[in-house]
Amino acid sequence: LNCLPHTPSARAGLLVLSALYQALLQSPESRVIARVADQDGHCIGFASGTIDLVATQQAVRRGLSNCQFVLLALHNLCRPKHLMAQWLWRKTVPSRKVGYILTIGVDRSPVTSNNKVSGKSLLDELESHFRQNGCDQVWVDTESENERAINFYLRNGYTVVRKDYGQVLLSKSLPRES
């Protein structure tokens, strides 16, 4: 599990995070990508996304024990602004057949040059997966304080759709593959 990125969900604990990503791996709507360095198994890049956010959220809920779900719920209650923003966005983001990026993370610690991975390559792979599954849009949200992520998405063709409660919602149209 050393390849799981440090995200706000990670603060719910390793057992919860492990169960959450196991559920993501079992969900047919989701895609999980990990790039692992050859010898030591250290994760150097990680991304996850879904083509059906509601179905994936339901699959994750079914994949968590009651105790794990309570821990995750308590963690989310500590972030009411994120919950309020997501509630506002429920009518903005189409519920089905759009790509939704859950997380992208790249290890920025020094590694040998042949073990590097870029956030752009992970993003391209997620977008390709979305396109292959009939999605013509991609959505992602992040905290407004996360300027690095916001600038990354803006450089890669995303536009800011909404800013609410310290959260930013971005979107991008996906051109059809020829």
Image: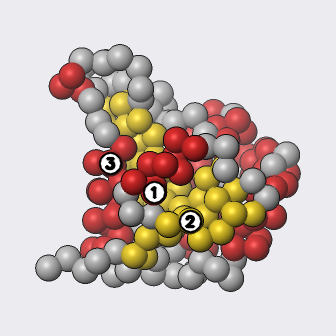
Indicate which label's residue lies in the foreground, 2 or 3: 2
Q: Residue at x 29, y 77 (%)?
A: 175
Q: Which residue position holds label 3? A: 120
101 or 12, nearer to the observer: 101
Asked whether residue 50 appears in the rendered view, the answer is no
Whole-Å distance between the Cαs marked 1 and 3? 12 Å
- Along the polypeptide, which appears first: circle 2 or circle 3? 3
Residue 46 coordinates in the image, percent (x, y): 41, 42
The scheme the figure's colours follow is: secondary structure
Q: Residue at x 56, y 82 (%)?
A: 94
Give the x, y percent position of residue 142: 61, 53
Q: Secondary structure at mark 1?
A: helix
Mark 2, residue position? 160
Q: Amino acid at mark 2?
A: Val
**Real-space Cα separation, disc 2 to disc 3, in angstroms:** 18 Å
Contact (Cβ within 8 Å) of mark 1 with mark 3: no
- The residue beneath circle 1 is 154
Q: Are marks 2 and 1 in contact (CB under 8 Å)?
A: yes
Q: Amino acid at mark 1?
A: Leu
